[in-house]
Image: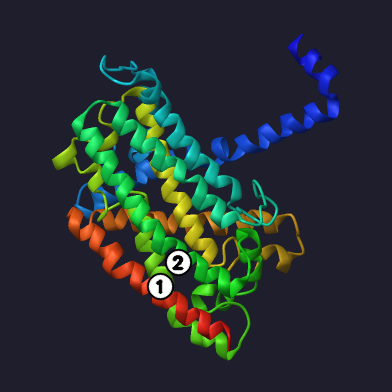
Amino acid sequence: MMYDFFVDLFGNTVIAGIASGILMSLLPLFLFILPYALLAVLAERKVSAHMQDRLGPMRIGWHGWNQTIADIIKLIQKEDIVASDTDKPLFNFAPVLVFAGSYAAFAAIPFSSYYIGSEVDLGIFYIIAVTGLVVAGILMAGWASNNKYSLLGSMRSVAQIVSYEIPTMLVVLSLVMVSETMSLHTLSEMQTGYFWNWYIFGGPGFSLTKFLLIPSMLIGFIIIYISTLAEVNRVPFDIPEAESELVAGYHTEYSGMKFAMFFLAEYANMYAVSAIVAALFFGGYQSPVGYLGNLLGVEWLIPIEQFLWFAAKGLFFVFVQMWLRWTLPRLRVDQLMAVSWKYLIPIAFVNLIVIGFITLI
């Protein structure tokens, strides 16, 4: 009855368009983000285990491959406990807002030349803007929990993310100056060909400007990668979740699926920032050595290759994030803020000016 009402009101074409839009928006969640999160959690355990001369999960499935599936089933079945003194509307809405901000960022990430959620011209700035919802959700979670550890963790996280967004934006602005576009899809298309056309190597073509840009691009890559580590609360910038000080940080009071949503959002953010770095500096979905589909004359194979290359680049940077977690010590609060305000921001600003002068040549 309801379906017939909407068909009479809008027509079959509009209803079909809305249904296809909803389906396309759900594809990244069920076909990529959820499988990736399960794989990333297992990889985190295995990487940490092997770095500490352990084996990690081994009991459920071959070498523990099904451990994360068992864990997510357990979380789904857990009781949703809400403390009596919490601000319940905000407490319940916070994990939804954090996950929505993380998930919405994938709308403008080009997985291949044929699959982009929304090919907006301001793609990179849309991603940075929409992930601001995560900041609001984290602060909301800490405040609504009525727990001093949660509030302190959320305030640390907000101060950290806001501080490190500045060098991130300066690096992004420098790439916009060079490429003259804010679309990640266009940026990826500009780096087509071979790996020497990537912006980490100065950009497409061969010119004096390209070779002069290489040192500045290397500096920009290092700055944005350090900044994105801080924005997703990864070591050495994990003081918002410092277990020795804050129990679990802003999600201390959460359990069951609400905790799982925070957990899923964290790993989704890890891939999102890695995908941005790959799209800006490492060719996006472009292959470094050409496409097998072109060699064989099979055009439908090219989008699949592009997706695999893009996924591999992003997963590599996620692996580096995990690697650093078990390599570097945690910074103090004053050290963390000093890295941003005393070092990254001034260096990124000078680098921006240098790139501006070089592009005028």
Secondary structure of residue under mark 1: helix
Q: Position of residue 231 (x, y in %)?
A: 37, 52
Pointer 2: what residue? 170
Q: From the viewer's perspective, is residue 255 above or below residue 284?
A: above
Q: Position of residue 182 (x, y in %)?
A: 60, 62
In what quadrant of the picture does the N terminus appear? top right
Crowdedness near tag 1: few (<14), some (14–19) or many (≥20) residues, C-alpha within 10 Å: some
Q: Residue at x 82, y 24 (%)?
A: 10
Along the line of sight, the residue nearer the viewer: 97 or 314:
97
Labelled disc at residue 9: none
Residue type at mark 1 is Phe
Q: From the viewer's perspective, is residue 293 above or below residue 70?
A: below
Secondary structure of residue under mark 2: helix
Q: Residue at x 40, y 44 (%)?
A: 267
Q: Residue at x 52, y 87 (%)?
A: 211
Along the line of sight, the residue nearer the viewer: 113 or 262:
262
CA gap between label 1 and label 2 equals: 7 Å
